[in-house]
Amino acid sequence: MLAIGSPNYSVRTSTSCNALLRELQQIWSDIGESEAEKDRILMELERECLEVYRRKVEEAANAKARLHQTVAAKEAELATLMAALGELNIHSPIQTEKRSTSLKEKLASIAPLVEDLRTKKEERMKQFADIKAQIEKISGEISGYDHLSNSLINSLSLEEEDLSLRRITECQTHLRTLQKEKSDRLNRVLEYVNEVHSICGVLGLDFGQTVSDVHPSLHGTAMGHSTNISNSTLEGLEHAIVKLKAERKIRIQKLKDIVVSLFELWNLMDSPIQDKNSFSKITSILRLSESEITEPGVLSTEVIEQASTEVERLTKLKATRMKELVLKKRSELEEICKMTHIEPDTSTAAEKSNAMIDSGLVDPSELLANIEAQIVKVKDEALSRKDIMDRIDRWLYACEEEKWLEEYNQDDNRYNAGRGAHINLKRAERARVTVSKIPAIVDNLINRTLAWEEEKKIFFLYDGVRLVSILDDYKLTRVQREEEKKRYRDQKKMQDLLLTEKEAIYGSKPSPRKSNSFRKPNGCRANGNGSMTPTPRRYSIGSGTPELLTPRSYSSRQNGHFREMRRLSTAPLNFVAISKEDTMSSYTSVCGSEPGSPPQG
C-alpha cells in the first residue's frame, strides 16, 4: 500500500479524478448541461472534496494528539514507577526521542517497560504489606494495642510513594529491631513469671491467680493468643514481685522469731528429738539467706500457724514446769561451780528459789534467765581461770606424789625382788623429781594468781577461799614441817648417842627374849629369820607435826554454800623420809641392842 503523501499515490489519485471528470463532462455533453450549471456542480464537487480532506485531517490530528497523550502518560507513569522503585539505571525511550519521530514506536517501546515495572511494583507492595503487617503486630504487642505512634503510621502510609530497595531495607531493619525487642521482652516476662512462680511456691500462694491479676495471657494461654509483653505487663510483674518479696521477708522474720522461741522452749523443756524433727523443715531457715529459701510451702500460712500453735502449747506447758526447770538449771549451775571450784551465787539457791516461786514474788522466767546468766558468767570465769586451775592440778598431783613417796620410803620391803618392785622404783625416781619442783610450782602459782587478781580486780577464790592464802599457808606449813623433820633427826641422833653411852657404861646386851618383848611395844615385828623389822609409823595431828594444807584440804571442810576456812590434811602423813640404814639404826637403839651383840640366828 502506498503512502498518501508519496508521488505515486498523487499521480494515481490525479489520474482517477481526471478520468471521472472526463466521464462527467461526457455525461453533461450528452445531457446538454449549461456551462453555468457545470461550473456550479464543479465548485460544489470541489467544496465537498475539501470538506472530506479537512475532516480526515482533523481526525488524523486528533488521533495524533491522543497518541501523543498516551505516550506522555506512559512516559509519566514510567518515570513515576522508576522513581518509586528506585530503578534509575533503566534505559528510558525518552532519551531516544530525537532519533525516533513515530509516536507508535515510542508507545511500543514504553509499554513493555511500564508493564514490567507495574509487576515489580505489585511484588514490592506485597512485600511491604507483609513487613507492615508484622511491624504493626509486634508494635501492637509492645504497646499493648493501645495506640501506634504517629511517626510509625506516617512511615507506613508513605510506602506506595517509596518502594525502593533502600526503603524496604530500612523497613526490614526496623522489623528486626522490633523482633529483637519482642524477644527481649518475652524473655523478661518469662523470667518474671518464673520468679513469681518460685516465690508463690515458697509462700504457698496461688500462682495462676497471681499472674492472671497482672494479665490473663500470662497463665492458661489459649490457642492463638500470644503472651502479652507490653510495658504495663512488665510493670505489673515487677510490682507483683516486689510485693511478693516484701511478703516473703515479713514471713521469714515472723517464722525466724517463732523458730527462736521454739529452740528456747525446746531447750527449757528438754523436748524429745521426735518433736524437734517434725519442725526440721522450718528450723533450717535460721542458717539460710532469703534467696536460699526455695522449698515449696515452707513459708505458707499453714506452716507458720502450725509453728505458732506449737509455741503456744510449749508456753503453756512451760508455765507448769517452770519451777522444775529453775531447780534443774540451779543444779546445773552448782555442778559447774563444783567442777570449777567457784562459789555459786547464793541469791538463786534452791531453797530461796522455791520460796520465791511459791510466794509469787518473782517471775519464774526471770529467775530462770538470771540463773542462765549466772551459768554463762561462771563459764566465762572458768575460762579465764583455766591456766591457773591447770597449774593447781599440777600442784595437787605433785602433793599426791609426795605423799606416795613418803609411804613408799617407809616400806622396808621396797627393795625386795618382788613382783612390781621395779615399777615402784621407777615411779619413786619420777616422784622425787616431781616433789623437788613443788616450791617452784607454788611460787609460780602465787605469781600468776596475783597477776590474775590484779587484772580482774577481784580475789581468786578456790571453793570460797582465797587461793593465795591457801598457798601461803601451804608454804608456811611446809617450812614448819622441814623444821620439825630437822628436830626429829636431831632428837634421834641424841637418843642414839645416849644409848651408845649407856651401853659403854653398863656393857649390857639384851637377850633375844628381852629384845622380842622390848621391840613389840615399840612397833617392831619379827620377820621370818628371827630378826626384827621396824614397822613404819605415821605421825598424826596429835604427834605435833604440822600438816600440809592444800585446796582439797580446805574444800573437804566446806559446808554448803557458806563454808568456813578450816585446816585439815588429806591424810595423816609421815613427813620424814628416812633411809633404810637410818631407820634400822634408830630402831636398834630404841630396842636396846648393844654394840658387839651377836646377830640373831
Image (cartoon, helix red, strand yellow):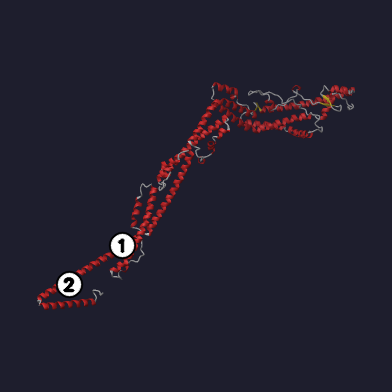
Residue occupying the point 51% across, 35% down: 256
Residue assigned mark 1: 77
Question: The residue under label 1 is which amino acid type?
Answer: Glu
In the picture shown, does residue 267 fall above or below 31? Answer: above
Picture quadrant of residue 400: top right
Picture quadrant of residue 427: top right
Badge 2: few (under 14), some or many (20 or more) residues near its Cα, within 10 Å?
few
Residue assigned mark 2: 49
Position of 416 with respect to 280 (left or right) is right
- Secondary structure, mark 2, is helix
Tag nearer the camera, 2 or 1:
2
The residue nearer to you, when weighing 47 against 474, is 47
Position of 419 with respect to 19 (left or right) is right
Mark 2 or mark 1, earlier in chain: 2
- The percent coordinates of residue 414 (x first, y second) are 80, 31
Question: The residue under label 2 is which amino acid type?
Answer: Cys
The residue nearer to you, when weighing 446 against 364, is 364
- The percent coordinates of residue 489 (x first, y second) are 80, 26
- The percent coordinates of residue 501 (x first, y second) are 87, 24
Badge 1: few (under 14), some or many (20 or more) residues near its Cα, within 10 Å?
some
Picture quadrant of residue 93: bottom left
Q: Of the numbered discs in the image, which one, if any, rests on residue 545?
A: none
- The percent coordinates of residue 57 (x first, y second) are 21, 69
Where is the C terminus found, in terms of image quarters?
Answer: top right
In the picture shown, does residue 408 fall above or below 32? Answer: above
- Secondary structure, mark 1, is helix
